[in-house]
Image (spheres, coloured by chain):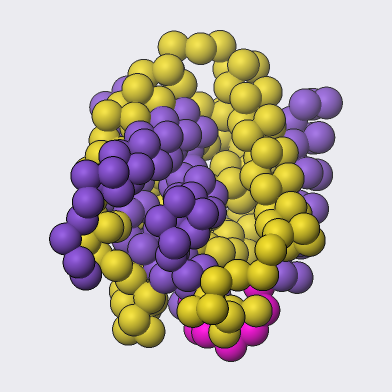
Chain colours: A yellow, B purple
Amino acid sequence: MIEAILIGLAAGVVAGLLGVGGGALFVPALTIGLGLSQLEAEATSLLAIIPVALVGAWRQRAHGNVDLRTGALLGFVAVGGAAGGVVLANAVPQRALEVGFAIFILFVAFQLVRRELWSVPPAPEAGAQA
Amino acid sequence: MARMPRRRTLTLAAIGTAAGLFSGLFGVGGGILIVPLLVLWCGFGTRLATGTSLAAIVIIAAVAAALHGAYGNVHLREGLLVGVPAVAGVLIGTELQQRISTKAISLVFAALLIVVAIDLLVG
């Protein structure tokens, strides 16, 4: 339980720093730390993401870093994809979901490493981030 | 913001659909797709991309969580147990982001994900 709380805190820091929901860490916190199944952990992770993204977006808005119109548009066009993903998650076997999630986070890790180590320098307005 | 050209709307529709699919399927917000694609395809600066991504995730996660809830997969207590400390974390993370390089954090995050992935694949 303590590890779930600590991973939750870390997931929040990562969410604020990288602009993600933190789900890649919430899911293992819920399976390893609290004993949920992969499917239950994924569903519960989404619930935990809502306040994190809300507070993160609110703080970033105060710093002038939110394009609300684009964010809202992205959110609304994602509804169809999200529905498809949820139906699929409930249809496939548990083990397939675990392996799929593992491959997904390996892809995420690869993306992050590639972006940090081999990418071209960020655009000028992003310069302050580096 | 200037009026959005049609092409840009289609680009955003593609990013949103992919993010939504990953969100529902893997229980994530989809930010890992949204942030780099806003930078690469829409010319956003990194911090504007992360802030905008979080705004989109609020809607995406709410929709995906509600749908998963309809299947009875959502555990409220466990969600609060990781979600409440994470809200404190995100306050720290967004403030830190205004000041420091995110390079080290990205790499630590990547290393952590690799460990979790191996554990899942072996376990």
Q: Which of these two is toward me, B114 or B49?
A: B49
- Specify whether residue A3 is in view: no
Q: Per the image, is B96 magenta?
A: yes
Image location (x, y in percent) of residue B84: 44, 64
Q: Residue at x 67, y 23 (%)?
A: A99
Q: Which of these two is toward me, A68 or A125?
A: A125
Residue range in magenta is B94-102
- Specify whether residue A121 is in view: yes
Q: Residue at x 30, y 48 (%)?
A: B8
Q: Residue at x 41, y 56 (%)?
A: B42
From this view, report whether residue A41 is shown above or below residue A64. above
Image location (x, y in percent) of residue A116: 72, 62
Task: Decide if residue A114 is on the left or right side of residue A43.
Answer: right
**Which image quarter holds the C terminus of chain A?**
bottom right
User: Which quadrant of the structure image shows residue A78?
Assistant: top left
Q: Residue at x 42, y 34 (%)?
A: B18
Task: Decide if residue B62 is on the left or right side of residue A8.
Answer: left
From this view, report whether residue B13 is shown above or below residue A84. below
Q: Which of these two is toward me, B31 or A123?
A: A123
Q: How many marks?
A: 0
Residue at the extreme bottom of the image, as rendered: B99
Image location (x, y in percent) of residue A21: 47, 54
Q: Per the image, is A19 magenta?
A: no
Image location (x, y in percent) of residue A6: 64, 63
Task: Decide if residue B22 is on the left or right side of residue A34.
Answer: left
Residue at the extreme left of the image, as rendered: B3
